Amino acid sequence: MTSDAPALLSHRVPDLGALELLLAVARHGSLGRAARDVGITQPAASSRIRSMERQLGLALLDRSPRGSRLTDAGALVTDWARRVVEAAEAFDAGAQALRDRRDSRLRVAASMTIAEYLLPGWLIALRGARPDTAVSLLAGNSALVAQRLLTGEADLGFVEGLSVPEGLDGTVIAHDRLVVVVAPSHAWARRRTPLTPRELAVTPLILRERGSGTRQVLDAALAVHGGLAQPLLELSSTTAVKGAAESGAGPCVLSELALGEELSARRLVKVPIAGVRLRRQLRAVWPAGHRPTGPARDLLSLTRSNPSGD
């Protein structure tokens, strides 16, 4: 690595403990009470805040005998810190569900987009409603989710396809939209007119594998336009598809849920398309004739009260 290479993000961004401490100061208006809240001494808390100020090159607190008040910069950093901590909570809930726990009382199978972008928030809500419920998570494409339910390996599933898989019952919990995206360097990023369905159909795309809900919807939408061309690449995860598209390898079609960060940072650019419907329903599913009960029923209820998608 050369001396002028940028520092790793972990060297530029405060650690999670420091951000949690800053949020506690914002809540209590006192460094001492914040220190007690997070379980450290006041001198340790003061040292951690000063270290964070040096790292960021910003004054975060105005200290006085009456307490500690956030500076204008500190208030803004606190808002950003809150989002990081919330994301960490979602990460923790998802990781906990992935662990293979013998005492699991709820086994969830979810397609990749739902598992990555929606399920962590639902699991945080379930933890609040049922703190003693142990959850295990199996992630895969929609076909694999159906298989897990039919073989009794899962109690509740979430899929993204066009219909309820055979042998299962289900209910719509949200709606989603597929979008065409390319790297900013791709010619489509500079188009002034929408793509036609035929143009999309004849273009080799970076695609999810067969059996995924994304691929199923795309296959059905373009069937009347000659069907999909031979894929440029066929990959088994949304992250891999995004990475290939960002590298400039070619266009891809993915869930809008999965593209928020890439679109806002303009690492990928949305390409308008006319004359084809790329919407889908997100469903909770379970074995036919066996309505969810207990924790599975509670999780199903939470998905309806906290929907994501439109």
Image: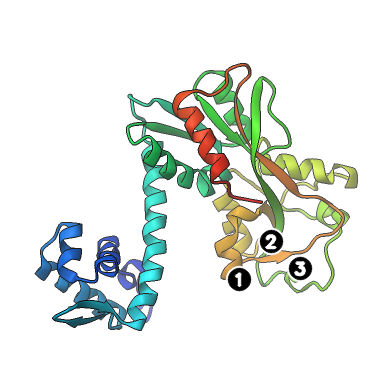
Left or right: 29 in relation to 283? left
Q: How far, Cα to Cα, is label 2 from label 3?
A: 9 Å
The crowd level at tag 2 (other Cα within 10 Å; few <14, some 14-19, many 20+) is: many
Task: Mark yes or no: residue 206 visible.
Answer: no
* Residue toward you, 173 or 272: 173
Mark 3 lies on a secondary structure that is helix
Amino acid beneath label 2: Val
Given residues 200 and 60, the one toward you in this image is 60
Specify the farthest residue to the top: 289
Residue 6 horizontal/vertical position (percent): 38, 76
Between disc 2 and disc 3, whose residue precedes? 2
Q: Please provide percent x and percent y for residue 165.
A: 68, 27
Q: Is residue 206 left or right of residue 71?
A: right
7, 153: nearer the viewer: 153
The residue sitting at the front extreme is 66
Residue 54 drawn above or below residue 87: below
Q: Please give the label number shown on residue 266.
A: 1
Please report contact status of discs 2 and 3: CB closer than 8 Å, yes or no: no
Q: Tag 1 or tag 2, which sits nearer the N-term?
A: 2
x and y percentages locating residue 184 in the rendered image: 66, 71
Determine which residue is flagged by label 2: 181
Residue under pointer 3: 188
